Image (tube, rainbow, N blue to C red):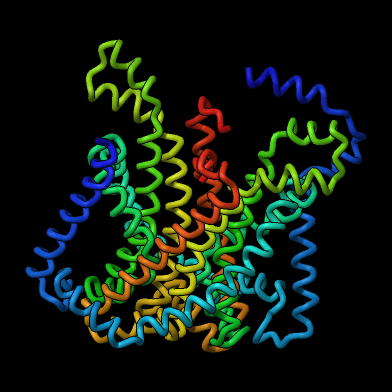
Amino acid sequence: MAELSANIAAAARPRAGKGAQLWKDPRLLGLLSVIIGLGLWELAADSFSALILPPPSAVLARFFDPAFLPRLLGALGYSLGALVVGFGLALGLALPLGVVLGRSPTLHRMFDPLINAIYAIPPVAFVPFLIIWFGLFFEGRVALVFMMCFFDILVVVIAGSRDVRRSLVDVGRSFGASRGQCLRLVVFPALTPFLFAALRVGSARAINGMITAELFFAAANLGQIMKRSTQAFDTASALAVVVTICLLGLAAQTAIQLLERRLLSWHLRG
Amino acid sequence: MTQVKNILFPCVGIAIFLVVWEIAGQYMGETLLAPPSAVAVDYIGLIRDGQMLSELVVSLRQMMIGFLLACVIGMPMGIIMGRSRIADAMLRPWVSMFVVTSTAALVPVLILLLGTGLALRTTVVFLAAVWYIVLTTYNGAKGISPQQIAVGRSFSAGRFQIFWKIILPSLYPYLVTGARIGLVHAIRAMVMAEMFVIIGYGGLIHQTGLMVETGALLGLLLTLMIVSLLANWLLGVAGRKLAPWYEQQRSIA
């Protein structure tokens, strides 16, 4: 049905010339915009000292610097360690808890305001607390990654579990499905779109937590490169770390999107 | 009956939480986790002392500059992106790049560029909030039904009339939701930036942490929580006043 209407819409659209279509390709325009932006930055950097605002070419050159690149990649590897552990723990706890709280009206009424209240506290504010509890090193960083993404995931999963349509569950019941079967065959599949939403939000927050921890606790990995290079007024290196984090975030979002498209082809995103 | 449940059940939930926390606090001691009874005593001290509230007022005032800037720039940007395909294609890569880049990673570079004063904090708050405001507004502007605009056209409304009478009113819920999400990120960024350069309310949290006073520390977090909930609630009320149809479309958030 949706396919049909899309076909009709495509047929109804006036046909533009080939040249005009090329111009309107959003990917081409996007690329153009990025190139223009980098060009303007390059020009603007001329009137600043390279210590304050290095041109994009200098930042790019950092990635080809044989002394810098291995350091960057090594630090990235260690950073990912804390990220994966913290994010994994948050997912492992928030998913079951979210389903339980979302599927039980009583528990939801009891704990929803409490969760919203804790969620309202900026996670960074827990840093001194986490230092007291977990120290300045790996455990502390894992704890901050966990704090950063746990509640974001939990809130999405609760919303998703509550959103499962009653009629779907009722159909399962009337076909004699047990509670467990209903959960496994109806609720979980209906939940998967929200699961991907939780993954998207959670991964972005987890990366944020990773770099925040590396800057706020004992400087380590990517955060350490960043701190050292800003102390040495090597802004190009610091920006190279920022670019790395940006690329990491984009890669995570793209990977989750691809996975979602592959696994959830049945789910029409409206 | 449901109303009684709606009030009673959350109270039971909070009571359970407080009891568990009290027991854990008593067991672990005040250096690790101050129990609620100790936090309550410390909290009265914090309010009497006055430093907490005065730092809070200063910090919030500075945060508002960044947040309002983010609204003033982010909302029109979102509308333009939602209504123009070319603007969408040109701006989208920048928005998706900035929204995944954590503001914390930008702070060390921004300190070199802007120093540690008001400009830094305003910029950090702005950068943390603006992209969420843009994206929410964008989704709203993109979702306006073409039929509504066609109706406006057939009643011979001009471009401006269509904008003021059709596009903007149907965007109100999204603008309010965008402001709410933006504000959450603005408060987070404010605390983050202040803890980084050890100034204002965030600086106070940092220093209290160094003294290992978990009672006062939790008191500071409690105030932050109240401020955040209050601001969110106020924006919700403003949304309902501005656009009574706000509630129906809340699910968009």
Residue drawn at x 10%, y 74% is B29
- Residue B63 at what x, y percent from top left? 53, 74
| Residue A217 located left or right of residue B190 | left
Q: Residue furthest top?
A: A175
Q: Nearer the viewer, residue B99 or A121?
A: A121
Instruction: Please indicate, yes or no, whether residue B104 appears anywhere in the rendered image.
Output: yes
Q: Nearer the viewer, residue B54 or B93?
A: B54
- Residue A94 at what x, y percent from top left? 31, 48
Instruction: Please indicate, yes or no, whether residue B195 appears anywhere in the rendered image.
Output: no
Residue drawn at x 55%, y 72% is B64
Q: Quadrant of residue A50?
A: bottom right
Residue drawn at x 38%, y 81% is B53
- A106 to B37, vertically: above or below: above
- Residue B7 at what x, y percent from top left? 26, 47
Residue drawn at x 30%, y 26% is A184
- Residue A169 at what x, y percent from top left? 34, 21
| Residue A205 located left or right of residue B1 | right
- B65 to A25, vertically: above or below: below
- A134 to A4, vertically: above or below: below
Quarter of the picture holding the N terminus of chain B: top left
- B72 to B217, vertically: above or below: above
Q: How many marks?
A: 0
